[in-house]
Each structure stands twice: as C-alpha cells, then as structure tokens.
Amino acid sequence: MVNRPGEDGKTDWTWRGHGATYRAAEMRVLTGWIAAGASGMVIGAAGSGKSNLLDFLCRNAHRLGARYPALEDGPALVYVRLGGLPDDTLTTFYRFILRAAHRSPTPFSTTWWGELTGLYQDMQADDPFPAQSALYNLLDACQAHDYRVVLFLDDFDMPPAPQILALGRALRSLHNVYRETLSFIVGARRRLDAVPDLDLPDDVYRLLATHICYVGPLVEADARRDVAYRLHTAPVAPTPSEVDQMLALSGGYPTLLKAVGRWWSLTPERGPAETWRTALGADPAMHIRLQAIWNGLTRDEQIALYALQRGDDTVADDAILRGLEMRGICRKAGDAWVLFGLLFADYVAEYGARTPDPIRIDKRTDLLFQGEKAIDGLSPKEQAVLHFLAERPHQRHTYTSVIVAAWDEDERYNGVSNDSLFQVIRTLRRKVEPDPSNPVYIVNYREKPEGGYLFYPEGRPT
C-alpha cells in the first residue's frame, strides 16, 4: 500500500468527517461500475458535494473494502481535478495525471508505481511525447501485472472547449489501447450534452454518458454527521431542535449546510431557531451559494422550479422534472412537488421571476424578439451584431468575425477598430441585458491571438 503523507485514519479529514457509511447509495453505484470495469459520469450541481464524494472514494478505498468488495485489493483509484490544470497543453495533462497517481494510495505492493509516476517531475513542458510515454509505460506495467486503474477526472465541464476536445482525443487514445486496464469516471456539474460548445469525440461521449450517477442533498444521517463534525469544536453543541432547523433550512445540501453551520458558530446572538430563516436569507455568504446553484440550472429548469414554487406543476414537462428530481433539487411529496430546502425555496420565490427571456429571430419576419416582445430601438450596427450572434448561438466569434458581419466592405476598407465594436456591444448590452455589468446573453471569451464573444440566447447557464 502506498499512501500520501499523513493520510491514516487519525489524520485524514475526509474519513473523520464522513465515515464508512457516507453517501452509501452513490457509493454502491460507483463501486458497481468499478467492479464491472465500466466508465461513467457523476453529475452534481454547484455545492452538491460531488467533488467531496469522488475525493473521499479515492482517498479511502483501502478502508472501505469490507463494505464494498469491489475495493478489496481492487484497482488503483486516481483522482484528478481538471479545474486545477495550469495550462491547456497535453504535456501538462499527462503530467497532471502522473502527479495525481504518484500521490494516490494504491493497493499494489510495488516499487515501480512510485518510480514511474514520479517521472512527472523531470519532464519538459514543451514536448507531450515523453509525458505520454511515461503514462503509457505505467499502464503497460499495470497491464502486465493484471492490475486495473480507474481515472477520476473531476471538473470535466470546466476547462474551455478547445482543451476539452484535446482531452477527449487523449482519452480515446488511452481507452483504445488500455480498455481492459483503464476506465474513466468523470465529474461534472451537468450532463455533457447540456454544456455549450463541448466538442467531444462521439465514442468518448458514449463511453462516459452510458452510466450516470447523480449527486444531490445528503441523506439525513449523513447531514447530521456533517453538522456534528463541523461543530464539534464549538463551546456549546447545537441542541437537537437547532440541528433539525439547520437541516430544514439547508435541505441537507452540502454547501448550504456548511454555510448554516458556519453562521451558527459565528453568530452568538442567533435568536430563536424559527427566526434563522430570515437572517440566513439575508446573509451574503448564503446568497452566493444559492445563486451558484440557481445559475447552474438551465432556463427551462429555472422556469419549472419557479412554477413549482408557486404551486403550478403543469409548466414543466416530465423530462425536466425527472432531471431535477434525480439531482435532488426537488421531490414529490404526496400530490405536490417541493424544493429541497427552505432557503432555496425562498430564493426561487424571490429570483425566479427575474429569469431572462430568450432572445430569438422570428423565422417568418426575421425580427429579433426577447421573449414575446420585439426588440426595438436598436441602431443599425446593434441590429447587425445581434442578428449575427443570434443566428449562430453557442459558438465562439472573434472580434474580427463580428466586425466582418456587421460593417460593410467600404467601412472595413477605411479601418474598423475593436474599440468601435466594443462601443456597439456596450450600448447593445444596455438594451437587452438584465444587468449590463454582468452579461448573460453576450459573453466575452479571452483567447490568444484574439478574443471574442459567445451568445447564449436563453442566458448563460453558469
């Protein structure tokens, strides 16, 4: 067994904070995939604890074999957070995997694992071939000894689209060569088919999307253990009724439960538990967490939740409701739908009506609409820019391509600067964006040698 420094049962916070029964339903699903050598996808909205679950499994597999037989002398589980990649090169990607493998606990009593994974420290950053070869050599050795490896790639929907395409090709190559030795479990905030501009090879998408595990609020036993662990150093422990209120307010949703516990520990004059709902609803830290959950939903999902909060379950179709239910965002209680926690329900009631209306081109008249209202008062250049973007949503458009579309040849002959485009975008945002300082329709992207814009007709999902 190879362990990371200091990771034993006494010092590893993931074990102390969660224990062997943590996320039992999700763990049964994931260990079932591991036993079958299957790849899959773990989906959890912002703050759902999806990353905590994957990290917990990879750190503690050697402690969980009695409960989950697939982990008893099972494969090496290597956890990689792609959101931490320092650049978008394949060299870094391969070295990133090797470093994660070097630091991971493994069930193999070998010396070659540490030697081969440690090669990441000696590689040059400008040549992917040695890094790829080192990873292939590691997998060759595993294959020769009949060892299996599961690569957990978290934040899979976070890197920019060109980087995802390169990673997708790299995964396809690895899978084609080591399909009996290597499997992948990726973590994402939403289904990959809902990520704008994601361009994965079809076979890689099928490999990852065949099996899906959704992560949402904690079950009550896990939530109570989480509260007890986070507040065990408090001078006075919360009373049972106070813990009940924490769970009702947060719905057991990990990021909200953490914020409620922190507020409780830092607020000596809390007042009666029945008054906490108002105080926490006005808390800036809580608002940020609620907003992140809300912004991670599609517009159709937001509309559905706002309708459910008003008691109308006729707006959303069954597929949308099923998707929300699988993620634990809402559930059926008798004949009614309820949202997962009181604080989130209050947030939806207040902010649901502010969901932006989609911008579209009417195919019959070729006019621009925002919701059911025609967009009036645009200058010719604003009209040309918005029409161009609305015809080509969810695509990257460089500054040059937008200028070519909106300025005629004579104007371009005399020179059109990026500043001229920026001025048009600035005034256009004032007319169509709910908050021009935080645009949701016309969104900048930065890239070398030239940046540009992405257009989200229904508002940016995250």
Image (cartoon, helix red, strand yellow):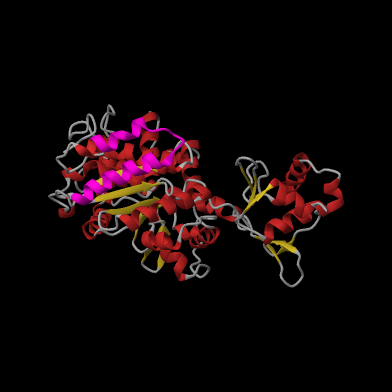
Q: Is residue 246 above or below residue 118?
A: below
Residue 65: tell me if it is visible. Answer: yes
Residue found at the very far top of the displayed protein: 235
The answer to whether 179 appears left or right of 347 in the picture is: left
The answer to whether 5 appears left or right of 42 in the picture is: left
Which one is in front, 100 or 129?
129
Residue 257: tell me if it is visible. Answer: no
> In which quadrant of the rendered view does residue 362 lie?
bottom right
Judge whether residue 124 is colored magenta: yes
Residue pictured at 47% horizontal, 60% vertical: 193
Image position, residue 436 (x, y; %): 68, 44
Q: Magenta segment, which residues?
A: 115-144
Q: Quadrant of the N terminus?
A: top left
The answer to whether 323 appears left or right of 18 in the picture is: right
Residue pictured at 62% horizontal, 55% vertical: 356
Q: Is residue 76 above or below residue 36?
A: above
Judge whether residue 44 is colored magenta: no
Image position, residue 4 (x, y; %): 24, 33
Image position, residue 214 (x, y; %): 36, 57
Image position, residue 377 (x, y; %): 81, 54
